[in-house]
């Protein structure tokens, strides 16, 4: 077949041109139908293959992984790519998120957006063709998160269960959220705050709310002196209730029970916490009150 570009118009200000088209090798993809002549006969020119089978004559198959993107699975390559030339890299029909939003619903307009989403760069995390991971992720979790985020804060002597399982998505939305840190539910920044279950909504997805509500218990928490609930004592206050993060790190900590070594104090001073865990209780030596001990089997200080 001759160079069709003598008659067919050039696609315009293309930045990227498909190699066969650039070389004028139209017959790599097109051929004359039997008993047909072009340009006189309608339907004279046909493709040498259909769908992905045409593309796979030169390109490696991209439908061999566990999870295959819908257009790839159906062989509809030109849903995303131009066959001849394009103003966009990889012969794409559009750039960035704009291409994905041709099919996917735009649910990414949130107050707190994940950086790659805010930049419209879906391909930081997702493979557009196929993947052995769910949601066409380029890597499994948490390896994908750690390809950008520092993993050092996620490993220590005491590790939060979702972090230990590599389930970052238990607490964080990977695209965006109305809440800081892309959290799935609210968790205020304040150190002191009036107790309201809504302020700890993300914690109570896994932890029992009753752990904070009951003044006395012999089972809801191990942080108790006899049956005096010390979580209730610290958190359930009308004015200066402590946030969970006043003592606990949400990812990992050097001390047992995710207890931090230091927490924000006043000005540049950070409040130290030294926690000595015992078989039936423990002792806290902190900068905000004198040393306190507790024991679940024999109360140390059972004042109301």
Image (cartoon, grey):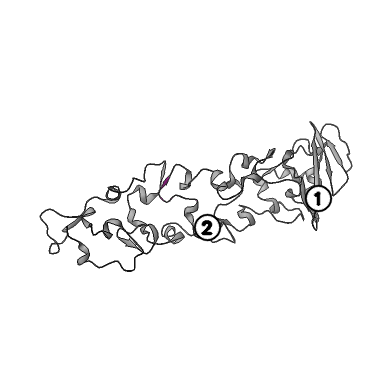
Of tags 2 and 1, the one toward the viewer is 1
For image coordinates 15% across by 62% down, the residue present is 42
Percent across and percent down for residue 272 are 81, 47
Query: Where, by quadrant of the figure, is residue 296 drawn?
Result: top right
The crowding category of the residue bearing disc 2, from other C-alpha atoms within 10 Å (few below 14, some 14 to 19, many at least 20), is some
The crowding category of the residue bearing disc 1, from other C-alpha atoms within 10 Å (few below 14, some 14 to 19, many at least 20), is some
224 left or right, relative to 70? right
- Pick whichever, 189 or 37, lies toward us: 37
277 left or right, relative to 84? right
Query: Where, by quadrant of the figure, is residue 4 drawn?
Result: bottom left
- Pick whichever, 100 or 94, lies toward us: 94
Percent across and percent down for residue 196 are 73, 53
**Residue 128 within the segment the image draws in magenta:** yes
In the image, residue 255 above or below residue 279: below
- Residue 215 in view: no
Figure quadrant of the C terminus: top right
Which residue lies under the disc numbered 2? 117
Label 2, label 1: how far apart the Cα atoms are: 37 Å
In the image, residue 117 above or below residue 303: below
Are circles 2 and 1 on residues that touch, CB within 8 Å?
no
Percent across and percent down for residue 49 are 24, 50
Residue 271: image tag: 1
Q: Which residues are magenta?
A: 125-130
231 left or right, relative to 174? right
Figure quadrant of the N terminus: bottom left
43 left or right, relative to 262? left
Question: First in sequence: mark 2 or mark 1?
Answer: 2
**Residue 12 within the segment the image draws in magenta:** no
């Amino acid at each position: 077949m001759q160079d069709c570009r003598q008659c067919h118009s050039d696609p315009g200000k293309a930045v990227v041109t498909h190699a066969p088209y650039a070389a004028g090798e139209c017959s790599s993809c097109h051929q004359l139908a039997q008993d047909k002549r072009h340009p006189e006969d309608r339907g004279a020119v046909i493709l040498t293959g259909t769908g992905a089978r045409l593309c796979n004559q030169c390109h490696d198959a991209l439908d061999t992984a566990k999870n295959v993107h819908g257009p790839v699975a159906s062989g509809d390559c030109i849903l995303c790519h131009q066959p001849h030339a394009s103003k966009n890299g990889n012969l794409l029909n559009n750039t960035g998120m704009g291409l994905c939003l041709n099919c996917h619903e735009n649910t990414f307009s949130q107050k707190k957006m994940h950086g790659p989403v805010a930049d419209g760069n879906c391909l930081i995390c997702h493979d557009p063709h196929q993947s052995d991971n769910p949601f066409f992720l380029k890597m499994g979790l948490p390896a994908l998160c750690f390809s950008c985020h520092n993993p050092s804060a996620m490993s220590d002597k005491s590790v939060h269960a979702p972090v230990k399982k590599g389930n970052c998505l238990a607490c964080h939305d990977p695209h965006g959220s109305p809440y800081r840190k892309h959290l799935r539910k609210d968790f205020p920044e304040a150190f002191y705050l009036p107790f309201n279950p809504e302020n700890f909504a993300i914690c109570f997805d896994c932890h029992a709310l009753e752990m904070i509500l009951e003044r006395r218990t012999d089972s809801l928490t191990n942080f108790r002196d006899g049956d005096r609930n010390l979580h209730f004592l610290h958190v359930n206050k009308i004015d200066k209730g402590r946030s969970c993060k006043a003592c606990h790190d949400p990812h990992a900590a050097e001390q047992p029970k995710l207890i931090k070594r230091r927490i924000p104090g006043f000005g540049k001073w950070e409040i130290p916490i030294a926690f000595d865990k015992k078989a039936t209780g423990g002792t806290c030596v902190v900068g905000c009150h004198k040393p306190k001990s507790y024991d679940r089997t024999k109360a140390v200080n059972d004042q109301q």
